Amino acid sequence: MHAFDVLGDPVRRRIMELLSSGERSAGQIAEVVAAEFGISQPTASGHLRVLRENGFATVRSEGTRRLYAVEPAPLQEVDQWLDGFRQFWSGPLDALATELARGKRRGSKRSRSSQPNSSDEGDSQ
């Protein structure tokens, strides 16, 4: 299955988001996606299986619990594929960052020039 087929499903994307913050048990994952998507525990388990079988997640047993974690390799492949398209947003984002920095510098200069001098404050009394 192609990476975008795996990640094209909103439940699997949400599971990956949950796993991005660290290892989680199958029960924790199922609870969240059941509440958010209205799916059953067996359906959530099916999504976990798809992620595991396609290399996006790893699983380990700890007693009776199955703990899932992100496997970064397939995500790196997606990132490499996206490299060919970064030109469409990197340039505009860099330009935006430059304009924001200019605006902050201008704002900083204005706020400094509009602040009263401490000597002026004493004269006004």
Image: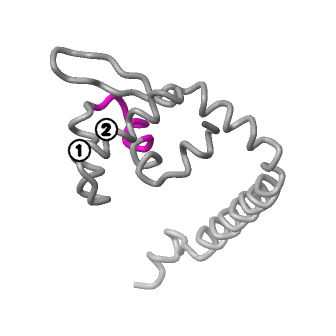
State the residue at coordinates (26%, 49%): 32
Q: Which residues are magenta?
A: 16-24
Q: Which amino acid, mark 2?
A: Ser
Q: Looking at the picture, tell me which residue is in the foreground, 97 or 76.
A: 76
| Protein image colouring | one colour
Return the x and y of residue 39 as percentages of the image width and height.
28, 54
Vertical order, 63 against 52 (above or below): above
Q: Which amino acid, mark 1?
A: Gln
Which residue in the structure is indicated by mark 2? Answer: 45
Return the x and y of residue 79 as percentages of the image width and height.
68, 38
Which residue in the structure is indicated by mark 1? Answer: 41
Q: Secondary structure at mark 2?
A: helix
Mark 1 surroundings: few (<14), some (14-19) or many (≥20) residues within 10 A? some
Check the picture and name the quadrant holding the C terminus: bottom left
Residue 78, quarter of picture: top right
Q: Is residue 109 left or right of residue 31?
A: right
Q: Is residue 118 left or right of residue 24?
A: right
Q: Secondary structure at mark 1?
A: helix
Are circles 2 and 1 on residues that touch, CB within 8 Å?
Answer: yes
